[in-house]
Image (cartoon, rainbow, N blue to C red):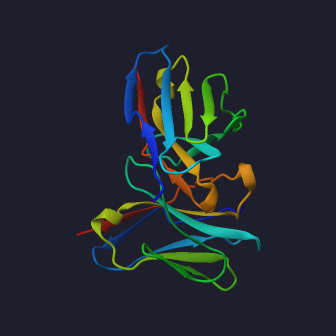
Amino acid sequence: GAVVSQHPSWVICKSGTSVKIECRSLDFQATTMFWYRQFPKQSLMLMATSNEGSKATYEQGVEKDKFLINHASLTLSTLTVTSAHPEDSSFYICSARRDSVAEKLFFGSGTQLSVL
Amino acid sequence: DAKTTQPPSMDCAEGRAANLPCNHSTISGNEYVYWYRQIHSQGPQYIIHGLKNNETNEMASLIITEDRKSSTLILPHATLRDTAVYYCIVRVRGGGSNYKLTFGKGTLLTVNP
């Protein structure tokens, strides 16, 4: 089956530093990937749509200069949380659309970010 | 995309069938019903989707009413590992590069021993 690998699984960082999260589609090419954020006991909130070779599309209210998304290849998208603050602490999840099986998304296992 | 309504929580005994309802009374003719689930601290997992006919796969069955205003996800023999939040999502199929899923609050299914 299609596998999406997300790394790291968890990260602790100091306030003001930047953190990069990687999302890889291991056995398929993904033109489109999605980044979600989830706070405790809440549902997933879509942050942005990442398109290979072009700029990401951000949802309303998401700061594009704070959450930098790069989708340089068909198998890798990265999310960088810049100048992280404690309120950025959250569970970040990526997903990829397998073009040949476009009706379902494959999700990574998530990254728990804790900003001290 | 049409809005969905799900009960916030349900309980089920291990080995019994779990029936999870979803109301989508404003669904349009070209919108599909998708089900995903999220086990605690993991990414969501696709379960099944359908348009108007009942669907079955190795994980579950999806029963859609004739008027398509509601549906039921059935896990025929629930196990403890099926404890998760189940999301019912209604959207238009495909959508090109703008394809995306919007998650509601879902139903927390707890399977008890």
User: Can residue A38 be seen from the camera position used here?
Assistant: no
Closest to the observer, A99 or B42:
A99
Q: Point out the residue furthest to the bottom here.
A: B66
Closest to the observer, A27 or B54:
A27
Quadrant of residue B81 within the rendered picture: bottom left
Q: Point out the residue furthest to the right here.
A: B29
Give the image location of residue B13, x and y in percent: 29, 74
Q: Point out the residue furthest to the top here.
A: A16
Height in image: A16 above or below B28?
above
Height in image: A76 above or below A27?
above
Give the image location of residue A112, x and y in percent: 41, 35
The residue positioned 62% from the left and 60% from the top of the image is A100
Give the image location of residue A55, x and y in percent: 72, 32
Q: Tell me the quadrant of the picture where the N terminus of chain B can be found.
A: bottom right
Q: Tell me the quadrant of the picture where the C terminus of chain B can be found.
A: bottom left
Q: How many marks can you see?
A: 0
Give the image location of residue B112, x and y in percent: 27, 68
Q: In this view, does A110 lie to the left or right of A65?
A: left
Closest to the observer, B90 or B8:
B90
Quadrant of residue B55 within the rendered picture: bottom right
Height in image: B102 above or below B112?
above
Height in image: B32 above or below B16?
above
The residue positioned 48% from the left and 40% from the top of the image is A39
Q: In this view, does B93 lie to the left or right of B73?
A: right
The residue positioned 48% from the left and 31% from the top of the image is A21
The residue positioned 69% from the left and 39% from the top of the image is A59
User: Can residue B78 be seen from the camera position used here?
Assistant: yes
